[in-house]
Amino acid sequence: MSNKALHCPTCKKTVTADNPDFPFCSDRCRIIDLGKWASGDYKITSPIHDPDLLEDLVREQNRSSET
Ligand SMILES: [Zn+2]
Protein backbone atom coordinates (compact mmCIF):
# COMPACT_ATOMS: atom_id res chain seq x y z
CA MET A 1 0.00 0.00 0.00
CA SER A 2 1.05 3.59 -0.46
CA ASN A 3 2.19 5.84 2.36
CA LYS A 4 1.03 9.06 0.76
CA ALA A 5 -2.43 10.47 0.21
CA LEU A 6 -3.81 13.79 -0.97
CA HIS A 7 -7.19 15.24 -1.77
CA CYS A 8 -8.04 15.47 -5.44
CA PRO A 9 -7.90 19.20 -6.35
CA THR A 10 -11.06 18.82 -8.41
CA CYS A 11 -13.46 16.72 -6.35
CA LYS A 12 -11.62 16.54 -2.98
CA LYS A 13 -11.71 12.78 -2.93
CA THR A 14 -8.79 11.11 -1.15
CA VAL A 15 -6.18 9.95 -3.65
CA THR A 16 -3.25 7.71 -2.79
CA ALA A 17 0.16 8.05 -4.40
CA ASP A 18 -0.15 4.68 -6.14
CA ASN A 19 -2.96 6.08 -8.27
CA PRO A 20 -1.66 6.56 -11.85
CA ASP A 21 -3.48 9.90 -11.99
CA PHE A 22 -2.10 11.15 -8.66
CA PRO A 23 -2.63 13.81 -7.34
CA PHE A 24 -5.96 13.56 -9.14
CA CYS A 25 -8.34 10.70 -8.45
CA SER A 26 -8.97 10.13 -12.14
CA ASP A 27 -8.07 11.26 -15.63
CA ARG A 28 -11.36 13.12 -15.76
CA CYS A 29 -10.51 15.26 -12.73
CA ARG A 30 -7.08 16.07 -14.15
CA ILE A 31 -8.62 17.26 -17.41
CA ILE A 32 -11.17 19.38 -15.52
CA ASP A 33 -8.34 21.02 -13.56
CA LEU A 34 -6.32 21.70 -16.71
CA GLY A 35 -9.43 23.18 -18.27
CA LYS A 36 -9.76 25.62 -15.37
CA TRP A 37 -6.23 26.83 -15.94
CA ALA A 38 -6.79 27.17 -19.66
CA SER A 39 -10.03 29.12 -19.26
CA GLY A 40 -8.41 31.58 -16.85
CA ASP A 41 -10.34 30.63 -13.73
CA TYR A 42 -7.05 30.74 -11.87
CA LYS A 43 -5.20 34.04 -11.88
CA ILE A 44 -1.49 33.68 -11.27
CA THR A 45 -0.22 37.27 -11.43
CA SER A 46 -1.37 40.70 -12.54
CA PRO A 47 0.63 42.44 -15.27
CA ILE A 48 2.00 45.37 -13.23
CA HIS A 49 2.16 45.25 -9.45
CA ASP A 50 5.53 46.91 -8.94
CA PRO A 51 4.96 50.42 -7.49
CA ASP A 52 8.38 51.61 -8.66
CA LEU A 53 7.65 50.54 -12.18
CA LEU A 54 4.29 52.33 -12.12
CA GLU A 55 5.95 55.51 -10.84
CA ASP A 56 8.45 55.40 -13.64
CA LEU A 57 5.67 55.03 -16.18
CA VAL A 58 3.76 58.02 -14.75
CA ARG A 59 6.92 60.13 -14.69
CA GLU A 60 7.62 59.21 -18.27
CA GLN A 61 4.12 60.21 -19.33
CA ASN A 62 4.28 63.56 -17.49
CA ARG A 63 7.59 64.38 -19.08
CA SER A 64 6.34 63.78 -22.59
CA SER A 65 3.15 65.84 -22.02
CA GLU A 66 5.18 68.86 -20.84
CA THR A 67 6.89 69.34 -24.16
ZN1 LIG B 1 -11.29 13.85 -8.41
Image (cartoon, rainbow, N blue to C red):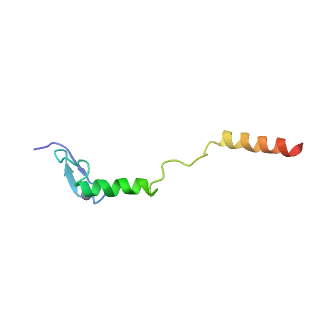
State the residue at coordinates (56%, 49%): 46
Q: Residue 62: name its quadrant.
A: top right
Quadrant showing the N terminus: top left
Instruction: State the image coordinates of residue 14 (x, y, percent, origin top left).
Output: 21, 54
53 to the left or right of 34: right
Instruction: State the image coordinates of residue 24 (x, y, percent, origin top left).
Output: 25, 52
Outermost residue toward the bottom? 11
Please indicate, yes or no, whether residue 64 appears anywhere in the rendered image.
yes
Number of marks in the rendered image: 0
State the residue at coordinates (66%, 43%): 51
Quadrant showing the C terminus: top right
Can you tell me which quadrant of the image ligand 1 is in? bottom left
Instruction: State the image coordinates of residue 13 (x, y, percent, origin top left).
Output: 23, 58
37 to the left or right of 1: right
Outermost residue toward the right? 67
Outermost residue toward the left? 1
- 39 and 19: which one is in front? 39
51 to the left or right of 62: left
Please indicate, yes or no, whether residue 9 appears anywhere in the rendered image.
no
59 to the left or right of 35: right
Instruction: State the image coordinates of residue 60 (x, y, percent, origin top left).
Output: 77, 40
State the residue at coordinates (44%, 54%): 42
- 40 and 51: which one is in front? 40
